[in-house]
Amino acid sequence: MPAKPITIGDHYFPRKGDAAAYFREMLYKYDLGDKVGAADAAFLSAAILLHPEADTKIGAGVASFSVRSADFGTRCFWVNRVDDTSEKFSFDACIY
């Protein structure tokens, strides 16, 4: 199967697997409960627009992103909305 490139914001990845590795590295550079830094938040803002449920995930608007635990003790990105609600989102859904 040929590689499928993807562009997320200013980042071009020759393969979707490269994008997934980038997300994973970002996810694990933060401790649980940390707010994501500005540069990474800009990338996640572009990525969440590619999510099939983007409107639902974004809701009232994005205030910030954080890394928290999810189902079964795994970690994931959370979008923290301007209305003080939050929702987890899968980066896999943004690229596959």
Image (cartoon, rainbow, N blue to C red):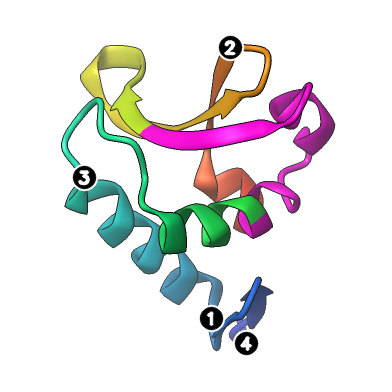
Give the magenta-colored segment's residue range: 46-66
Tag 3 residue = 30
The residue closer to the viewer here, 61 or 6, is 61
- Please, is residue 58 above or below residue 49 in the view? above
Sequence order check, earlier mark of 4 and 1 = 4
Tag 1 residue = 15
Sequence order check, earlier mark of 3 and 4 = 4
Secondary element at image label 1:
loop
Sequence order check, earlier mark of 3 and 2 = 3
Residue 3 visible in the shown view = yes
Q: CA distance from mark 3 to mark 4?
A: 33 Å
Q: CA distance from mark 3 to mark 2?
A: 21 Å
Tag 4 residue = 2
Secondary element at image label 4:
loop
Q: Quadrant of the C terminus?
A: bottom right
Q: Check if residue 64 falls in the magenta segment.
A: yes
Q: Position of residue 13 (x, y in %)?
A: 54, 82
Secondary element at image label 3:
loop
Q: Position of residue 40 (x, y in %)?
A: 43, 59
Q: Position of residue 62 (x, y in %)?
A: 65, 34
Left/right of residue 32 with respect to residue 7 in the rendered view: left
Residue type, mark 4 in image: Pro
Residue type, mark 1 in image: Arg
Left/right of residue 81 with respect to residue 20 in the rendered view: right
Q: Check if residue 79 falls in the magenta segment.
A: no
Q: Which mark is residue 84?
A: 2
